[in-house]
Image: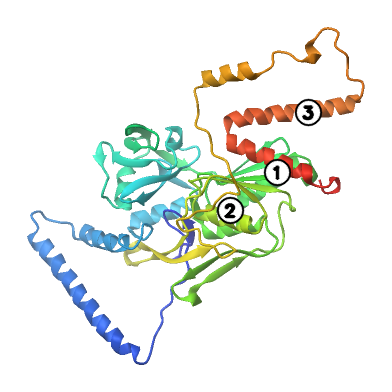
């Protein structure tokens, strides 16, 4: 069966597991340790038989064993777990970019389920779920104390069915309920848009569609603008991207690099470490790049942001990323299930681990919270001039520019007004677009 190599919060990147034989005096110690282990396993067997025979109600033996396995793995770290056959199937479907659910990526923090990021164009996003929210109840039933998999199971259900989750959010005085209708989640890995002469690449997940979507999006957008000479730069938007496949994170990083290390992994045994390097060829021909991140950018997103930042290939803008820098191996097991086990940490090209620290942006830009639209309109009207010199009767014309120069100025003014409009819609993205314009303006004319 296939070994899945992932770099995401809920199931992540993998290295090879090896069996090592050790000879010599250490064997005597190994024999003693093995004896102790077998004694403990005998104890587990005794407990299992006693529960099965004497518990007040009849228990499902399969559920009991799964709970024991989950407890063992959950005691290690938040990302190690047992995947029952149905969960393993769900994970494989998700990496292909379509699955049923709410559209949120979650983790566990101090026993509480925490939203890493709502996914674009999903029921959770439409319902207003935000990165950093804590979920305490599902349909009025507390999920505190449950394992992450148990809590996720409670949130699953038939497409079209309703679920009510109770959310605790920083800045809100009390918990509140959010009603969501479950739906089939079909993720478009990459969405491309053009803002003036800037190409914005919104990467929502690292599925097996991501690199192809990125490459095609770049090609189509460049053609629409009439060639790379007319492109000021690229914005790679990784906000609220919880991660995905490691090979896709490497390919996306490689799309903007000509050479050098992208990411490395190191486990307990140095011989199990891996290093991934860029290949020649930059799809953007060295054009300026801005990467957008926030607290919902995790794992594979942090690999891309860290690689481009360390190589000084991109300016990273936004807020600190999630900080998920551990490596998981997903190994199929007997019975069609799988084990997700933390086996290593990953490191950016400069050798730094982002585990629990995250990627710090070069320029910190927080996204303002939405305000009342009526207030914004009043403020805008108060600050906007009602007329200009050109509106005055008999005002002199500007005779120092040609008609072509006048048209160029009008086009530049229209672009500036479009960016101002974007600033109200998405302040961080508008900042990135403005930054690229500034970087482009500093380039020598011959290279533009």
Circle 3 residue:
411
In the rendered image of this protein, does residue 402 appear above or below residue 56? Answer: above
Q: Quadrant of residue 196?
A: top right
Q: Sequence order check: which comes first, mark 1 or mark 2?
A: 1
Q: Sequence order check: which comes first, mark 2 or mark 3?
A: 2
In what element is the residue under mark 2? Answer: helix
CA distance for labels 3 and 1: 23 Å
CA distance for labels 2 and 3: 33 Å
Q: Position of residue 413 (x, y in %)?
A: 75, 27
Q: Mark on residue 220?
A: 1
Q: Sequence order check: which comes first, mark 3 or mark 1?
A: 1
Q: Quadrant of residue 117?
A: top left
Q: Can I make out residue 227 in this image?
A: no
Q: Mark on residue 251?
A: none
In the rendered image of this protein, does residue 328 appear above or below residue 284? Answer: below
Q: Quadrant of the N terminus?
A: bottom left
CA distance for labels 1 and 2: 24 Å
> Between tags 3 and 1, which lies in front?
3
Circle 2 residue:
305
Front one among 395 and 10: 395
Q: Position of residue 85 (x, y in %)?
A: 34, 58
Q: Quadrant of the C terminus?
A: top right
Q: Horizontal placement of 436 versus 341: left or right? A: right
Q: Horizontal placement of 207 versus 29: left or right? A: right
Q: What residue is shown at x 68% (from left), y 45% (from top)? A: 234
């Amino acid at each position: 069966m296939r070994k899945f190599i992932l770099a995401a919060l809920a199931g992540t990147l993998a290295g090879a597991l090896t069996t090592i034989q050790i000879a010599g005096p250490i064997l005597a110690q190994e024999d003693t340790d093995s004896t102790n282990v077998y004694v403990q396993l005998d104890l587990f067997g005794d407990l299992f038989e006693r529960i099965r025979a004497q518990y007040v109600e009849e228990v499902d033996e399969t559920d009991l064993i799964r709970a024991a396995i989950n407890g063992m793995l959950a005691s290690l770290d938040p990302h190690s777990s047992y995947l029952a056959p149905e969960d393993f199937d769900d994970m494989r479907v998700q990496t292909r970019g379509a699955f049923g659910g709410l559209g949120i990526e979650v983790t566990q923090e101090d026993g509480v389920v925490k939203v890493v990021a709502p996914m674009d164009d999903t029921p959770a996003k439409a319902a207003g779920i935000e990165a950093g929210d804590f979920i305490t109840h599902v349909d009025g039933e507390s999920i505190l104390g449950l394992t992450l998999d148990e809590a996720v199971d409670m949130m699953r259900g038939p497409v079209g069915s309703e679920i009510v989750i109770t959310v605790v959010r920083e800045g809100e005085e009390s918990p509140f309920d959010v009603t969501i209708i479950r739906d089939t989640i079909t993720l478009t890995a990459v969405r491309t848009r053009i803002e003036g002469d800037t190409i914005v690449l919104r990467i929502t997940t690292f599925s097996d569609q991501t690199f192809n979507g990125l490459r095609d999006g770049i090609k189509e957008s460049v053609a629409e603008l009439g060639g790379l000479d007319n492109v000021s730069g690229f914005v790679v938007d990784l906000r609220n991207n919880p991660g995905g496949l490691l090979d896709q994170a490497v390919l996306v990083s490689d799309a903007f690099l000509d050479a050098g290390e992208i990411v490395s992994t190191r486990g307990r045994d140095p011989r199990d470490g891996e290093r991934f390097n860029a290949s020649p060829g930059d799809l953007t021909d060295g054009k300026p790049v801005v990467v957008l991140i926030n607290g919902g950018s995790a794992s594979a997103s942090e690999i891309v942001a860290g690689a481009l930042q360390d190589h000084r290939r991109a300016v990273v803008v936004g807020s600190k990323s999630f900080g998920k820098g551990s490596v998981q191996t997903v190994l199929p097991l007997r019975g069609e299930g799988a084990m997700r086990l933390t086996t290593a940490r990953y490191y950016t090209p400069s050798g730094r681990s982002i585990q629990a620290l995250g990627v710090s942006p070069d320029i910190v830009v927080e996204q303002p919270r939405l305000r009342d639209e009526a207030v914004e309109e009043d403020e805008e009207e108060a600050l906007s001039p009602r007329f200009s010199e050109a509106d005055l009767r008999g005002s002199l014309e500007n005779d120092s520019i040609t008609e072509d120069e006048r048209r160029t100025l009008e086009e530049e003014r229209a672009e500036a007004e479009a960016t101002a409009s974007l600033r109200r819609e998405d302040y961080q993205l508008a900042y990135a677009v403005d930054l690229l314009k500034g970087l482009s303006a500093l380039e020598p004319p011959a290279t533009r």
